[in-house]
Image (cartoon, helix red, strand yellow):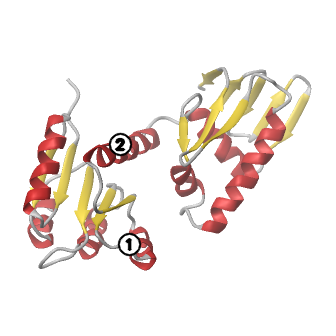
Amino acid sequence: MEDKVKIFMCEDDENLGMLLREYLLAKGYVVDLFPDGEAGYKAFVKDQYDICILDVMMPKKDGFALAQEIRTINSEVPIVFLTAKTLKEDILGGFKIGADDYLTKPFSMEELLLRIEAILRRVNGKKTKEVPSYRLGSFFFDTQKQTLIRGEEQTKLTTKESELLSLLCAHANEILERNYALKAIWGNDNYFNARSMDVYITKLRKLLKIDPAIEIINIHGKGYKLIATMEEIAR
């Protein structure tokens, strides 16, 4: 039987915390709820969690301070901040600490659930085995040699082009979230990296358009979707 996802939650608003906990429990998650950063930290060092949901404004130890301490213990666990703050500096500060997402209050519980599910999909995707090559429509894509081959024609891809196409292939016929791709390849999702990724998407479209059955489409507000027949070819 598959282990349930365990959520670490710190929220000083007792009513909101209990509502969120009950909602997520009903959705099949295990949720440990703590009223402040100090209580949360003491519990975190003794247990293991799959994702952290942290209120920013908390007594004794705020969410940013707690997140920094969590990162010294576990550099990989996803962190979602909940906050009433909307200042750009606060949002950027959260991402600099290593946040995976950021929800501004008020938000719907359904939105939080969708964000959690998206983050867990990304995390689980990182843990999957690397695939050395793909049969992508009429193309053969070798991720190790960074080559795209169709018939007698062979194109050498740049490292970024190869990494981006690999991500698209790994998420073929489903949405590749824009922020995830930016963080996975460039390390963060700032404006300049976002513009660079748009350029690489355009280059890949030009390379693949010779096969009319392959298409990279924009999903407004979310990311991209590679539409193609796909076959993974392991070593």
First along the sequence among labels 1 and 2:
1
Decide: is 195 above or below 20: below
Decide: is 201 above or below 93: above
Q: Pick whichever, 171 or 130, lies toward us.
A: 171
Name which residue lies at 33% across and 47% down: 111
Name which residue lies at 74% across and 27% down: 214
Decide: is 204 above or below 142: below
Q: Position of residue 109 (x, y in %)?
A: 25, 47
The reply, left or right, for residue 29 in relation to residue 177 is left
What residue type is disc 2 on?
Answer: Leu
Q: Position of residue 190 (x, y in %)?
A: 57, 67
Is mark 1 in CB contact (under 8 Å) with mark 2? no
Q: Which mark is residue 86?
A: 1
Callout 2 environment at 10 Å: few (<14), some (14 to 19), or many (20+)?
A: few
Q: Secondary structure at mark 2?
A: helix
What residue type is disc 1 on?
Answer: Thr
Q: Which mark is residue 114?
A: 2
- Quadrant assignment for the C terminus: top right
Between label 1 and label 2, give the one nearer the viewer.
Answer: 1
